[in-house]
Amino acid sequence: MRLVVLVSGTGTNLQALLDACADPAYGAEVVAVGADRDGIEGLARAELAGVPTFVCRVGDFADRGAWDRALAQAVTAHRPDLVVSAGFMKLVGPPLRSRVAMVNTHPALCPAFPGMHGAADALAYGVKVTGATLFVVDDGVDTGPIVAQVPVPVADDDTAESLHERIKVAERAMLVGSIGRMAREGWSLDGRRVRIG
Ligand code: GRF
């Protein structure tokens, strides 16, 4: 399965995928990494792994629609079977999503705590269990059909940062496990229900 991974930051989820893909038995290959900004660790990780990169900055385009079309062009040039948004901090519009399936990972148990601050919002609400969700991207914000979820307990002394870091450990394992199964066993969508195999 050919993967294009989109990142905006440190790229630890990307690194986990790159490490998994080093084993041919994993069943997937990261064929390119895209970003919405320059100079981020995620791009450096891709370059170190010898994976082609591209950058598509919203500010370089007349409007968001033009950016969406350029992103679609840049991604599909690599002929992906699946696009993985892994810490990509932009909503992606129909030009890309109509051409290739896309999954995203979110640091909360959807449909709870959507948006930019999943870990901090869960902590502030006072939940005792949160986690991470892998879902198929749709028109909403973290609303798409759910591929996988993993629970993470909230500790009494957690800060937003400590909680997010612990979520990310579970999130990376869930991402690697789920993408590998999707690649090896295939997957399908029936309404909101995602089936692997
Ligand atoms: C992840 O927790 C992701 O769910 C969230 O941002 C974090 C990205 O981490 N949107 P990294 O860049 O993969 O280290």
Image (cartoon, rainbow, N blue to C red):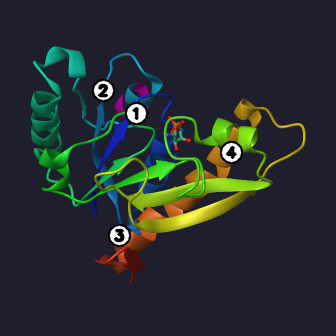
Mark 2–mark 1 Cα distance, whole angstroms, equals: 8 Å
Label 4 to label 3: alpha-carbon separation:
31 Å
Say which label, 2 or 3, has the lower sequence index.
Answer: 2
Q: Main secondary structure of the magenta part?
A: helix
Q: Residues within 10 Å of mark 4 (few under 14, many from 20)?
A: many
Number of the front mark, 4 or 1:
4
- Does dot 3 land on a helix, a strand or a loop? helix
Q: Which mark is residue 89?
A: 1
Q: Residue at x 69, y 38 (%)?
A: 165
Indicate yes or no whether the magenta region holds residue 113: no
* Disc 1 crowd, CA 10 A, few/some/many (<14, 14-19, 20+): some
Range drawn in magenta: 44-48
Q: CA distance from mark 1 to mark 3?
A: 25 Å
Which residue has dot 4 on it?
122
Q: What is the x, y in percent for residue 31?
A: 26, 47
Badge 4 vs badge 3, beta-carbon distance below 8 Å:
no
Res 36 label: 2
Name the quarter where the N terminus is drawn. bottom left
Amino acid marked by disc 3: Ala
| Camera-side mark, 4 or 3 | 4
Q: What is the x, y in percent for residue 11?
A: 48, 35
Q: Residue 183 bears which disc, if any?
A: 3
